Amino acid sequence: MTRTPQHQRRTAPLPDADDHSEGFKQVREARRTALVEDYVELISDLIAEGQEARQVDIAQRLGVAQPTVAKMLARLTESGLISRKPYRGVFLTEAGHKLAAESRERHETVEDFLKMLGVCEKTARIDAEGIEHYVSVETLDAFRRALAAGKLNPQKK
């Protein structure tokens, strides 16, 4: 029988199987929706900056190839989140605007919370880009309460 080294042992027992699986379900759902949210948020940001949200611009900002963007734009069109016009950019539908606003609000909350912890602005922006999709409503509410209360006083870096 092989023994697990002390540093690899859990300090607490495994949670109930149903509770344990809930966390994995949440991660799978977040992974499924993260890319869609990133696209609609970026499209919204480009339009808000007075630019057209063109396929080439989206590809450049996301660091992916244009064919990758074309596939996702087709998926977003089928989902009713965007509309496209020949020789023009991409436009958000009402549902797309709603999803972009929700995603942006989550991102800003996470980013502001990280900065309040003392994380530098650039790192907070980058980290928030991933965390925003995986954080629960309960945790976001806790972040908001901490931000509103100004509970943390980080040292500026």
Image: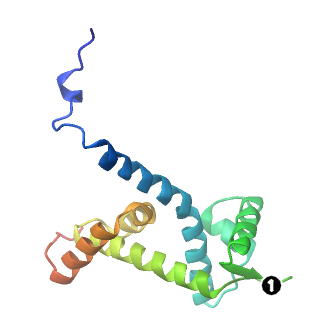
The x, y position of residue 156, in whole percent, is 21, 71
Q: At 28% from the left edge and 72% from the top edge, which residue is drawn? A: 113
- Which quarter of the figure is the N terminus placed in? top left
Q: Nearer the viewer, residue 101 or 47?
A: 101
Q: At 81% from the left edge and 84% from the top edge, which residue is drawn? A: 85
Residue 8 visible, this orientation? yes
Q: Is residue 84 above or below residue 21?
A: below
Q: Which residue is situated farthest in the top direction here?
A: 1
Q: Is residue 101 left or right of residue 136?
A: right
The x, y position of residue 157, in whole percent, is 24, 67
Q: Is residue 27 left or right of residue 78?
A: left
Disc 1 marks which amino acid?
A: Arg
The x, y position of residue 53, in whole percent, is 69, 80
Q: Is residue 67 left or right of residue 122?
A: right
The x, y position of residue 5, in whole percent, is 21, 21
Q: Nearer the viewer, residue 17 or 132?
A: 17
Q: State the SS at label 1.
A: loop
Q: Nearer the viewer, residue 25 or 132?
A: 25
Q: Which residue is situated farthest in the right direction here?
A: 86
Q: Which residue is mark 1?
A: 88
Q: Is residue 102 above or below residue 6?
A: below
| Res 26 quadrant in image | bottom left
- Quick one: label 1, few (<14), some, or many (20+) residues within 10 Å? few
Q: Is residue 3 above or below residue 78?
A: above
Q: How is the image coloured?
A: rainbow
Residue 114 visible, this orientation? no
